[in-house]
Image (cartoon, rainbow, N blue to C red):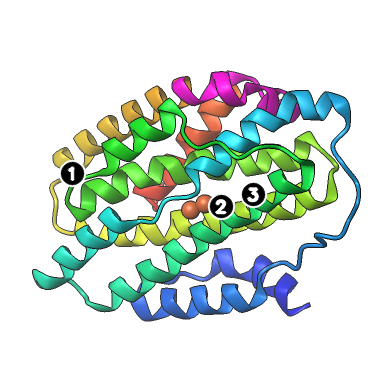
Amino acid sequence: MLQQSLRTRSPLIARSTAAEWLAYFQANHVNSRVIDWQNTQRFCPTERQRLGHSIAIFQLGEGSEGHRLMKAMRTWAAQGGDQAWVEVLKWFIREEQRHAADLGRLLDHEGWPRLRSHWLDSAFRRLRGGWNLEMSLSILLIAEIVGLLYTRALQRATDHPIAQAVAAQIAWDESQHLLMQSCLLGLLRQGRSPRWLGLTRSLHRSLLWVTLRLVWPDHRCVFRAAGWSFAQFVRTAMTELDRAIDPSS
Ligand SMILES: [Fe+2]
Ligand SMILES: [Fe+2]
């Protein structure tokens, strides 16, 4: 009950400080969905063919240690940023690792091998490295949007109870990660000119579009099973991005 009320109420709560986000992550840790790992239902043969490889790729992408993001955050904090965000980011990374662990357990449950590498995951990790906090978060935001849409689609693509529960929890978490990163990016971009913000928005949308094009071939079976076309995928992703980088839109 508490879990349900938190889920329905929280998106409406405007959390704007590190302390509020820290409290959220700690509460979400306690209230996260209980998954019935003993459930014996398996994917049907069609689903195995459609979903298996896609889930394995997605699981790999969720498995980041977040070292470079933490380094960028610590650098920002050392240069006068709010130190309290360092702790928030630790909780955020812990949550991402839970996603990878749960998806890994789902793969194990189905007897599917875990992937060790995938070219797109490697490219994305390289792209995320070496930037300042703002750029790191901007790139991360793209991954969050893909993760959010993917897990929403996965819930619709199957009635497998464990996959549904794992996807529902991740979709919830990612929706909040987007809000958190939006909040932090807003903080970092305070005082920037409208022209600069407009340019940033265009670059962000271009990066998202390229990512969606690259992601689609590996995951289209999931999105199509959920009834989404590529055009819908792009439209929804762009709407999420616009909300995240300009919460007033
Ligand atoms: Fe995630
Ligand atoms: Fe996330």
Residue that badge 1 annotates? 194
How far, Cα to Cα, is label 2 from label 1? 38 Å
- Tell me if 176 is positioned left or right of 138 in this view: right
Q: Which residues are magenta?
A: 214-230
Q: Residues within 10 Å of mark 3 (few under 14, many from 20)?
A: many
SS for dot 3: helix
Q: Inspect the magenta stretch and tell me whether residue 221 lies in it.
A: yes
Q: Residues within 10 Å of mark 1 (few under 14, many from 20)?
A: few
- Relative depth, front residue between 239 and 74: 74
Q: Say whether marks 2 and 3 touch (CB < 8 Å).
A: yes
- Tell me if 63 is positioned left or right of 75 in this view: right
- Residue for point 71% across, 37% down: 112
At label 2, the amino acid type is Ala
Q: Answer whether residue 226 is visible to the viewer in this image.
A: yes
Q: Say whether marks 2 and 1 touch (CB < 8 Å).
A: no
How far, Cα to Cα, is label 3 from label 1? 41 Å
Which label sits in the foreground, 2 or 1? 2
Query: Relative to residue 198, is residue 10 depicted above or below?
Result: below
Residue that badge 2 annotates? 100
SS for dot 1: helix
At label 1, the amino acid type is Pro
Q: How many marks?
A: 3
How far, Cα to Cα, is label 2 from label 3? 5 Å
- Residue for point 86% across, 60% down: 38
Res 103 label = 3
Res 18 label = none
Query: Relative to residue 188, is residue 29 depicted above or below?
Result: below
